[in-house]
Image (spheres, rainbow, N blue to C red):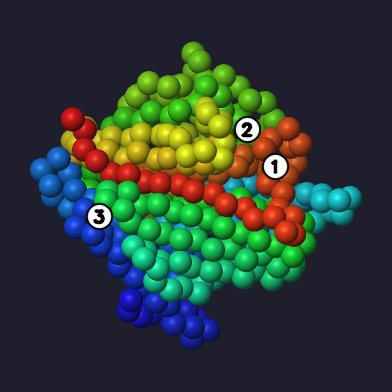
C-alpha cells in the first residue's frame, strides 16, 4: 500500500498492488477503481490490459467515462431517476439526460472507500447513508478483489437497514492489445446469451427480451466486434455502437461463463464469469479523448470495451426483470471473475 494522492477535501487515497507473477493489479481506494491490470501476451510479455491513468487527479477531473470504477448504488440507468418501493416514490437526481446513470451525480465511484488487505487481495467498504443521492436505507457495500493464478475475482456483498435497490458492477475498459496500442474493433467476442434487452433512444430498456438470432447482437459464436457495429440496425444506431444488456444463459446465482474476448494480434484472451443475470457490453462509444491514458494516448471512441456484469438496467421499473430489491436482514452477494489466458 502507498498513498496515491489526496482528494479536494484533503482525504488521502491509498493505492494497492496485488501481484502473483501471473497478473499484476493496482486498485485505488478512490471509487474502488481498478487502475491497472497487467497480463501476459502469447510471448509472455506483460502489458496493461485495461485503460487507466497513473494520476489520481485524472480520475477526479474526468469521472464521466467511469474508467475502472465500481459503479453504484445503481449501475446503469434508472428511467427519469424514479422508482417506487412499498408505495413510496424515490427520486435520484438525473445525470444522463432525463435519467439517472450509475447512481446519480455522486455515485460510489466518487467516494474514498475504507480499505484493508485480506489473504490474496484487498477488501474495500463503503457505507452509503440513508438518502444518499435519493436512495433509501443505509447501505453497506463490501467489494473484495482477490488474485488466484490468472484470475482476478470480485466479490460484492451488501446489506441495508431499509428496503432499497442495488446494482453494482466494475466499469473497467479492457484493451487486450496491451498498453493502449490500438482500438478494440478487431477483437473477437463471444457472449453466452440468446436474448438482450433493447432500449429506447435514452438507452432505457423497453422491457422486451429480444432474441439475438439473425441480428448483429448475436455473439453466441465468436465474432469480430467491428464486423457489424456499423450495420443499419436501429439498436446500434441509437447507442452509437454496442451499449446493451445481454440476458445471460444459465442460472443467475451460479458462476457461469458470460463472455470471452480475444485479441488475435497479442493472443490475449479474457474469460468473464459471473453470478449476475446480465452483462452490459459497451464499446466505449462515448469516449471523447478527454481522459488521457498513462501511455500518452487520449481515449477516444472504441479504445476500450466494458463487460459490466449486472442486473438489467432500470430493473426497479420492470417488475418482470430479476429483482434488484434489497431488504433489511437480507444480504446481496454477487461474484464476477476475470481470467486471462492466451489463444491456442
Ligand atoms: C455504461 C452505459 C454507457 C455509458 C457508460 C459510461 O456502460 O451503458 O451508456 O454511459 O456507462 O460512459
**Is 325 located above or below residue 24 in the figure?**
above
Instruction: Where is residue 219? Give x, y as percent.
Output: 42, 24
Horizontally, residue 188 falls left or right of residue 71, namely: left
Quarter of the picture containing the C terminus is top left
- Depth check: 225 or 145 in front? 145
Query: Residue 7 vs residue 209: left or right?
Result: left
Residue 48: tell me if it is visible.
Answer: no
Q: Quadrant of residue 234?
A: top right
Occupied quadrant, residue 316:
top right
**Residue 167, image x and y in percent?**
61, 50
Residue drawn at point x = 40 percent, y = 40 percent: 272
In the rendered image, which residue does mark 3 sit on? 23
Q: Which numbered disc, 2 or 1, marks the residue that appears first in the sequence?
A: 2
Q: Which mark is residue 191?
A: none
Q: Are marks 3 and 2 in contact (CB under 8 Å)?
A: no
Residue 199: which disc? 2
Q: Nearer the viewer, residue 330 or 127?
A: 330
Residue 273: percent from the left, percent from the top? Answer: 43, 40
Q: Residues within 10 Å of mark 1 (few under 14, many from 20)?
A: some
The residue where tag 1 is placed is: 323
What is the spatial separation of the Cα atoms under label 3 and label 2, in whole angstroms?
A: 37 Å
Q: Residue at x 49, y 13 (%)?
A: 214
In space, the residues marked 3 and 1 are separated at their CA atoms by: 35 Å
User: Which class describes the residues within 10 Å of circle 3: few (<14), some (14-19), or many (20+)?
Assistant: many
**Residue 155 falls left or right of residue 332:** left
- The answer to whether the residues at label 2 and label 1 have Cβ atoms under 8 Å apart is no
x and y percentages locating residue 332 in the rendered image: 62, 53
SS for callout 3: loop
Cβ(mark 1) to ligand 1 < 8 Å? no
Residue at image coords 38%, 21%: 221
Amino acid at each position: 500500500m502507498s498513498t496515491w494522492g489526496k482528494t479536494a477535501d484533503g482525504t488521502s487515497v491509498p493505492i494497492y498492488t496485488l501481484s502473483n507473477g501471473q497478473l499484476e493489479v493496482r486498485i485505488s481506494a478512490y471509487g474502488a477503481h481498478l487502475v491497472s491490470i497487467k497480463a501476459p501476451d502469447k510471448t509472455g510479455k506483460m502489458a496493461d490490459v485495461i485503460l487507466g491513468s497513473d494520476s489520481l487527479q485524472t480520475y477526479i477531473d474526468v469521472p464521466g467515462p467511469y474508467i475502472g470504477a465500481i459503479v453504484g448504488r445503481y449501475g446503469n440507468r434508472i428511467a427519469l431517476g424514479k422508482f417506487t418501493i412499498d408505495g413510496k416514490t424515490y427520486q435520484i437526481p438525473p445525470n444522463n439526460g432525463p435519467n439517472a446513470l450509475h447512481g446519480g451525480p455522486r455515485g460510489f465511484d466518487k467516494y474514498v472507500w475504507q480499505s484493508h488487505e485480506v489473504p490474496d487481495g484487498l477488501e474495500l467498504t463503503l457505507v452509503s447513508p440513508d438518502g444518499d443521492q435519493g436512495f433509501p436505507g443505509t447501505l453497506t457495500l463490501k467489494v473484495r478483489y482477490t488474485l488466484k493464478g490468472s484470475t482476478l475475482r470480485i466479490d460484492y456483498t451488501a446489506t441495508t437497514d431499509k428496503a432499497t435497490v442495488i446494482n453494482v458492477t466494475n466499469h473497467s475498459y479492457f484493451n487486450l492489445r496491451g498498453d493502449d496500442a490500438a482500438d478494440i474493433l478487431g477483437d473477437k467476442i463471444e457472449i453466452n446469451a440468446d436474448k438482450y434487452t433493447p432500449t429506447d433512444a435514452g438507452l432505457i430498456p423497453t422491457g422486451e427480451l429480444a432474441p439475438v438470432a439473425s441480428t448483429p447482437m448475436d455473439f453466441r459464436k465468436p465474432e469480430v466486434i467491428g464486423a457489424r457495429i456499423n450495420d443499419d440496425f436501429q439498436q446500434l444506431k441509437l447507442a452509437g455502437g454496442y451499449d446493451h444488456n445481454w440476458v445471460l444463459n444459465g442460472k443467475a446465482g451460479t458462476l457461469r461463463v458470460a463472455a470471452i474476448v480475444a485479441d488475435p494480434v497479442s493472443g490475449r484472451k479474457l474469460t468473464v464469469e459471473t453470478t449476475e443475470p446480465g452483462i452490459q457490453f459497451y464499446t466505449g462509444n462515448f469516449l471523447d479523448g478527454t481522459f488521457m491514458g498513462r501511455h500518452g494516448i487520449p481515449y477516444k471512441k472504441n479504445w476500450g470495451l466494458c463487460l459490466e456484469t449486472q442486473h438489467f438496467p432500470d430493473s426497479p421499473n420492470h417488475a418482470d426483470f430479476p429483482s434488484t430489491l434489497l431488504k433489511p436482514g437480507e444480504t446481496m452477494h454477487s461474484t464476477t471473475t476475470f481470467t486471462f489466458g492466451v489463444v491456442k
